Image (tube, rainbow, N blue to C red):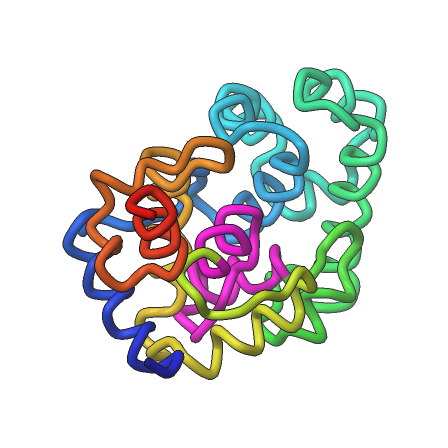
Amino acid sequence: MNNKDLAKLAENALKEKYPHAKCSLVYEKPHELLIAVRLSAQCTDARVNIVTPALFDKYKSVDDFANANVEDVENIIKSCGLYKTKARDIVNMCKQIRDEFGGVVPKEMDELVSLSGVGRKTANLIRGDIFGEPAVVVDTHCIRITARLGFHDEKNPVKIEKILAESLSAEGSSDFCHRLVLHGRAVCKARSPQCGICNMKDFCKYAKTEKNDKSS
């Protein structure tokens, strides 16, 4: 089975299991998603969603964040961890958006990754969720599950992104990645994957190997 055939099966299975795929971070404006994603580094989405209401209530616009006192932002986001670096990045990225992009979150990959604290993973999330562009968000769930399925044996996120971008349907790639997060939390866990209840077990390389190992 080639990767495109595997992608069709995986996309359909995940869509059936998780029909309402969306980012678990709560936001209303494009820059708020950008900030929430920055806060989520080495922090749970649940914790970020506890912190952001107060943050977004005090700083309502890109200009507000660009003019913010970094120490005040630090105090609000402190429970997210790495708060000093995150606060600095948040203020600086909003200054860049204001000064270089007319106050509007940019759409193109090279523009997004030019912002403070923004890498390809974050940029792809913004491109997919805000702009509806084909996008592959390569997080830990994506790396683990797509390797188990048999798409690749890579560890490099950029290489994995390229492999998946060439395999997945353009219109379904962003939702596919959101569904991988849900599946990774509920079924295909890092230490104890529950292959027996997985609706991808019939075409998953890892599940088939596990089944053969148990029967031998």
Residue 188 placement, left or right of 57: left
> What stretch of residues is rendered in magenta?
121-147
- Assign the N terminus to one quadrant of the image: bottom left
Furthest-front residue in view? 216
Does the magenta stretch mainly form a helix, a strand or a loop?
helix
Whether 86 is drawn above or below 154: the answer is above
Residue 18 lies in the magenta-colored region: no
Q: x%, y% of residue 210?
A: 37, 47
Residue 191 placement, left or right of 116: left
Q: x%, y% of residue 59?
A: 62, 32
Q: Quadrant of residue 169?
A: bottom left
| Residue placed most toward the observer, 73 or 203 | 203
Q: How many marks?
A: 0
Residue at x 84% of width, y 23% of height: 71
Residue at x 33% of width, y 52% of height: 212
Whether 120 is drawn above or below 193: the answer is below
Residue 138 lies in the magenta-colored region: yes
Residue at x 38% of width, y 47% of height: 213
Residue 175 placement, left or right of 144: left
| Residue placed most toward the observer, 69 or 46 | 46
Whether 27 is drawn above or below 115: the answer is above
Furthest-left residue in view? 16
Q: x%, y% of residue 142?
A: 49, 54
Residue at x 61% of width, y 58% of height: 121
Q: x%, y% of residue 116?
A: 80, 53
